[in-house]
Image (cartoon, rainbow, N blue to C red):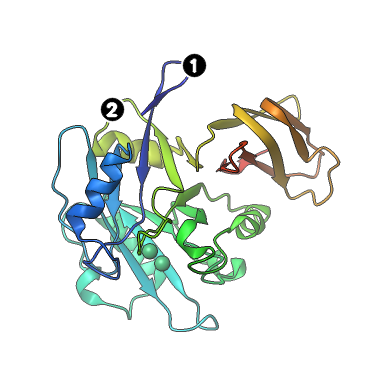
Amino acid sequence: MWIDQNGDTWYRGNLHMHTQCSDGNLPFAEAVALYRNAGYDFLAVTDHWHWCDAVQEPGFLMLRGCEFDVGASVQEGIYHIVGVGCEGDPELVRKGKDLSAQQIIGQIHAHDGFAILAHPSWSLNRPDRVLKIHDIDATEIYNTFSGIPWNARPYSGDFVDIMAAEGCLLPCMAADDAHRYAGEQCRSYLMVKAPALTREAILTALRKGDYLATQGPMAQISIEEETAVVHCTPAVRVVFYSDGVWSNERVTEGDGLTRATCRLKPHETFVRAEITDAQGRTAWTSPIKTK
Ligand SMILES: [Zn+2]
Ligand SMILES: [Zn+2]
């Protein structure tokens, strides 16, 4: 939990990880305890095609979660959709892998849950195809377990930018997607601004986009008089991303940066920022419209 300069409360959580209920290395209770002991406030265990029954403990919120993976090849389209916060028992768990990504998202929403497109770069998701899938609530921009030494393509910023340039501004999330618990766990997570640590308050905040994907730094982006402005905890680098492919103000570097700016040009339609601290940890703001 972190309280900002306005007195608002931010809760730390992970919405994508696995246990022995699917292909993770740790037993369910051991994995949950690991996050709790690491200072997390909430967690969704998202085993493949398996809704774990979340046992609530005081001061720690468990959201029901599941990862639905469909598609046998990149040519066909591989989609991993993480559903969190669902109530009841979504029928799709029983229906199995012949479902489309769109049907899975529909089922998650029918059970009052939140649908996240997991690791689109790892899956080699094509923006032109994802644009045809409706009602995705958010996308992972960073997934630790998709990265080296476990895998490849942890970073989906290019996907986010192409989607945003086409007018689809997907809110950005980060998760560790822990499977092996060999150093990937607790590296990338979500900070959610909410008035209370309850399912309703966290889901409301998720739907409003009141969260930050991060590995440590805290940051917020806004637009003031045609300039994108980032306020952040001390950083060594702030980089702005938009659909303007050239900008000589894109990168600000220095020691202890707490503010950075980038003047926007008339043709730029969105902007987002990545903030890196002295320990090499990054935060990713979601893209926002420039007008
Ligand atoms: Zn996955
Ligand atoms: Zn996963």
Residue 21 locus on image (x, y percent): 21, 66
- Quadrant, the N terminus: top left
Q: Is residue 29 left or right of residue 210?
A: left
Q: Is residue 266 left or right of residue 174?
A: right
Quarter-of-image position of residue 206: top left
- Quadrant, the C terminus: top right
Q: Which of the pair 68/98 is nearer the observer? A: 68
Q: Is residue 241 left or right of residue 172?
A: right
In percent of the image, x 49 and y 62: which residue is there?
Answer: 119
Mark 1 belongs to which amino acid?
Gln
Position of 115 relative to 264 (above/below): below
Residue 85 locus on image (x, y percent): 27, 49
Res. 63 visible in picture:
no
From the image, tell me which residue sits under label 1: 5
Q: Is residue 104 left or right of residue 135?
A: left
Mark 2 belongs to which amino acid?
Ala
Q: Nearer the viewer, mark 2 or mark 1?
A: 1
Q: Which of the pair 42/203 is nearer the observer? A: 42
In percent of the image, x 58 and y 49: which residue is there?
Answer: 169
Residue 196: give its label: 2
